[in-house]
Each structure stands twice: as C-alpha cells, then as structure tokens.
Amino acid sequence: MSLSITVYTKDQCGECVKTRKFLENRGIPHLVQHISDSDESAIATLKEVAEGMGVAPSMPYVRVHDEATGDTVAWFGHRPDQIVQHITSKRARK
C-alpha cells in the first residue's frame, strides 16, 4: 500500500507542529508544503476547499492519497484521530 501524505503548514502554527511531530514520532513519511502568508492564491484555494467541506479553514491542512485505490481523504486541523483512522490503520494492514 502506498500512501501519499501532504501536510500544508504556515509559520508559527502550533497545530501544524503537533501534526508533523505526531507523524514523525510514528515513522510516517510525509511531505510538508509551507504556505506563506503572502501566498494569496494558496490561501484562497484552502478557503475554497474548507467551504466545500463545510468546515472553517484552519491549519494544518492534511491530505492523504491512497495510490492503490485512488481514494483521497483530507481534513483541517491537528486531528490525531484522523491520522490513526486513515493512515496508521492502513499501514498496519499491509
């Protein structure tokens, strides 16, 4: 099983740091994509994504793509429950 995990972060984001450490402490490889405060296009895109999901935009934004099935799941905020549900459990089933 091959999961592609991207964590979108911003400067001085405590929840972003918690999420990255949670992944790192479990040996889960992931890509960190930094969003600068001046990147209006990326910020607007994240706001649109949040609106489409019916949630308030907050950082980090985590996107998990299962390359085997083509499924993608994403969420906003530090969500260890989502990491366990969508990443850790899938890795254990390999």
Image (cartoon, rainbow, N blue to C red):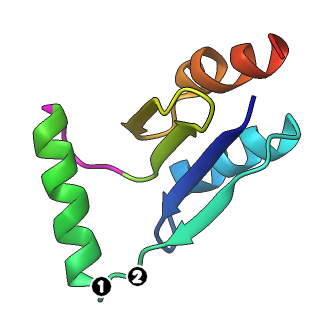
Q: Which residues are magenta?
A: 54-58
Look at 41% across and 37% down and name the residue there.
74
Residue 91 in the image: state x and y as whole percent. Answer: 79, 22
Contact, mark 2 vs mark 1 (Cβ under 8 Å):
yes
Residue located beneath label 1 in the image: 39
Mark 2 highlights which residue? 36
Q: Is residue 13 magenta?
A: no
* 60 shown above or below 79: below
Q: Position of residue 64 (x, y in %)?
A: 53, 39
Separation of residues labelled 2 and 1 (CA atoms): 5 Å
> Going by the image, does 76 lie left or right of 81?
left
Q: Quadrant of the C terminus?
A: top right
Residue 54 percent coordinates (x, y): 13, 32
Mark identifier at residue 17: none
Please name whichever residue, 88 or 12, is drawn nearer the observer in this view of the structure.
88
Circle 2 — which element? loop
Q: Tell me what residue is drawn at x 82 percent, y 46 percent.
A: 24
Q: Residue at point 55% right, 54% down?
A: 7
The amino acid type of the residue labelled 2 equals: Ser
